[in-house]
Image (cartoon, rainbow, N blue to C red):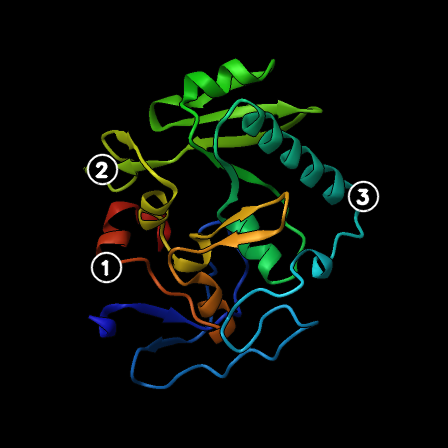
């Protein structure tokens, strides 16, 4: 099944659902050259080293946005919920890049998220997503979930609450499927995203045909 997995060199613009552009490679037809280690960020096993110290955050606005995201995580944890950074912001931090936005994944239900914060917007409550306002900046907080069947090529029919591991398996690419505990800078990687970053490949989680049929915007 490995030959069905999508691989792509980095080289296009960065986006929340994976990068576009660059040369496509099929597994078995040549491996991309390994990324040179940068500031000790990734070791030979693809594991993060000295994670927090290598993130470039000279921009005060970036620091402020990340600080707000940490406070959102802490607020949820104080109420007994699991909460992590999720998705593209984790990918960017593993790469040593400042993230533009921070999304949070949690074991809290949408109702519980709304009850934990003073200012929220139910932008995608049916799909487990609540927008939390912290210091006037919006953060998307999503419940760990599994998606029901996709029928329109864009959104699932509904969701089922799940574990972090199960939530990671529903995501598009391994590099976007990692979580980060921001209080101890620990990357939680159920899908091999760190190793793929080290190898400079973009790989679908599971069957790539299914991933693209579920949501056409992943193309």
Foreground label between 3 and 2? 3
Give the SS element for disc 1.
loop
Q: Of marks 3 and 2, which one's residue comes earlier in the chain?
A: 3
Q: Position of residue 23 (x, y in %)?
A: 42, 76
**Horizontal placement of 117 versus 21: left or right?**
right
Give the residue number, with chain letter if any, for mark 3: 60
Question: Does 119 sit above or below residue 97?
Answer: above
| Mark seen at residue 207 | 1
- Quadrant in which residue 42 is drawn: bottom right
Residue at mark 3 to residue at mark 2: CA–CA distance: 41 Å
Q: Of marks 1 and 3, which one's residue comes earlier in the chain?
A: 3
Q: Position of residue 89 (x, y in %)?
A: 56, 49
Q: Position of residue 109 (x, y in %)?
A: 40, 23
Give the residue number, with chain letter if any, for mark 2: 152
Give the SS element for disc 3.
helix
**Horizontal placement of 96 versus 24: left or right?**
right
Position of the N terminus by quadrant: bottom left
**Horizontal placement of 184 versus 188: left or right?**
right
The residue positioned 53% from the left and 22% from the top of the image is 79
């Amino acid at each position: 099944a490995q030959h069905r997995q999508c691989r792509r060199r980095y080289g296009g613009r960065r986006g929340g659902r994976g990068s576009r552009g660059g040369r496509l490679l099929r597994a078995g037809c040549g491996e991309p050259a390994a990324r040179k280690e940068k500031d000790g960020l990734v070791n030979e096993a693809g594991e993060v080293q000295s994670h927090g110290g290598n993130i470039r955050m000279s921009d005060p606005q970036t620091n402020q946005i990340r600080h707000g995201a940490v406070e959102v995580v802490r607020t949820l944890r104080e109420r007994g919920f699991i909460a992590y950074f999720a998705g593209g912001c984790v990918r960017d931090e593993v790469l040593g890049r400042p993230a533009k936005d921070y999304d949070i994944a949690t074991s809290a239900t949408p109702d519980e998220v709304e009850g934990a914060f003073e200012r929220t917007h139910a932008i995608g409550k049916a799909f487990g997503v609540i927008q939390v306002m912290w210091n006037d900046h919006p953060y998307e907080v999503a419940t760990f979930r599994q998606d029901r069947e996709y029928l329109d090529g864009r959104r699932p029919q509904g969701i089922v609450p799940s574990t972090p591991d199960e939530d990671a398996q529903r995501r598009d690419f391994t590099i976007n499927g990692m979580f980060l505990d921001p209080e101890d800078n620990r990357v939680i990687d159920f899908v091999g995203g760190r190793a793929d970053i080290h190898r400079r490949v973009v790989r679908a989680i599971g069957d790539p045909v299914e991933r693209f049929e579920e949501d056409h915007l992943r193309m």
